[in-house]
Image (tube, coloured by chain):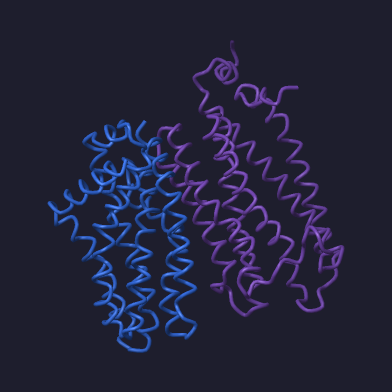
Chain colours: A purple, B blue
Amino acid sequence: MNLYYYASPSTFYPLAGKLIPWFAALALILTVVGLYISFFLAPTDFQQGEGYRIIFIHVPAAWMSMFIYVVMAFWSAIGLAWNTRLSFVMARALAPTGAMFTFVALWTGAFWGKPMWGAWWVWDARLTSELILLFLYVGVMALQAAIDDPRRADRAGALLNLVGVVNVPVIYFSVKWWNTLHQGSSVSLTGAPSMARIMLWGMLIMALAAWMYTIAVALVRARSLVLERERQTDWARTLLEGKP
Amino acid sequence: MLKFLFTVIRRDVLLAARRRGDWLTAQFFFVMVVSMFPLGIGPEPSMLRTIGPGVVWVAALLASLLSLGRLFADDYRDGTLEQMLLSPYPNTLLALGKAIAHWIINGIPLLIIAPVLGIQFNLPAEALWILVLSLAIGTPILSLLGSIGAALTLGLRGGGVLVTLLILPLYVPALIFGAGAVEGVFSGTGPEAHLSLLGAFLILSLLLAPWVSAMALKVSVE
């Protein structure tokens, strides 16, 4: 099968339509399972009490906020290099979800910070860089929204996207580089995690749920963007008006 | 190549010198924004000394943003920019020249005004030197990164506000290291670490920003 086959809007549109229900269903199931584990199976933390359960939302949201930005930058780079229309559509479709997850990470972090640190907000390296990430998302979306010509909007947004991507490693390593109030990571690829296994499972399942949700929502958004842009073409007209 | 760069710089500086009103607006904006803070916060000398470096730096960011609108816009409107982009020289040099000219016009005056404002904020002599030094390393960064924003928002409705939204997050490292260097004088850790980081950031933006803003110009003009 040729992978490039689906890079064409006319073939991508029906494929995305078929995939969306699957990803949406997976997102729903994983969220239910993940929330069940986080609220009923995971034990109470001996230091943080019940408040620690916020991490089951906070950590997946923070992961997704960074990951989505990198994926957007990836699509932007592909789009700028090979001039593929669909890559820009994907980058654009991901942006609102990424901004939403960044906001959720900051918001849940504030809720966690109040009982644990005694402050809603501190100007710590990780919090600040995550806030800048939110600004970067807003900047990319505002730039794309301000330009009427979709071709220029795509390219300008992609360039800004790529410039901003330097912030992501800064967020990721901020807890290592600086001595911050925000704690270091409890999960790593190499060492054993410094948390109970069941907590880790809850977090990973929630992260997977967030991932599936992102894919489903981005595909829905990409589909409507494709339809909007391809409204002049034959296949889109056939689809919209129901006649050949 | 170098001659082209110098021509671009010379032209922009000359144009600014002949339209002093435009040019002075940003400098007075800088002075006024800084002067608003003691009025709003109160004239407590020790408090002013703490917030002084940060206030001067934030005002420098805003003043540099204010003047970015005209970096490419005038040339774009009368079609000069298109002709310049068609020239046989690399567009990166054009973007670099424009950014350097912006720094000469808007950055250097800030360096001269900043110590006077620093005195208003009760900064000691040593801190004043570091403030000027940090601005000397930092303001070229503002012009270089700003040129990306100016190129991206070329000819858009409400481009001025938009450029603030796009570029301020990118200015954050310069602000942190710049104001941090002066802070280092007070706290006793010394300004060297922050100044080195600021220098590294300058080198990085000098390498990448003209290239990105040349690409952005192409996107905006085509």
Q: Nearer the viewer, residue A124 or B140?
A: B140
Q: Residue furthest top?
A: A244
Query: Residue B135, located in which quarter of the rendered image?
Result: bottom left
Question: Residue at image x 56%, y 52%?
Answer: A99
Instruction: Name the quadrant of the N terminus of chain A.
Output: top right
Residue A106 in the image, given as x and y percentages of width and height = 60, 63
Decide: is B139 above or below A161.
Answer: below
B165 vs B11: above or below? below
Q: Observer-nearest residue: A18 or A129? A: A129
Question: Which one is in front, A126 or B125?
Answer: B125
Where does the C terminus of chain A fall, quadrant-wise?
Answer: top right
Can you tell which quarter of the image residue A219 is in? top right
Left/right of residue A141 with respect to residue B15 in the rendered view: right
Nearest the viewer among A244 and A52 is A52
x then y, percent, for residue A228: 52, 28
Residue B211 spot, x, y in % from top left: 43, 44
- Residue sitting at x 33%, y 35%: B89
x 35%, y 62%: residue = B139
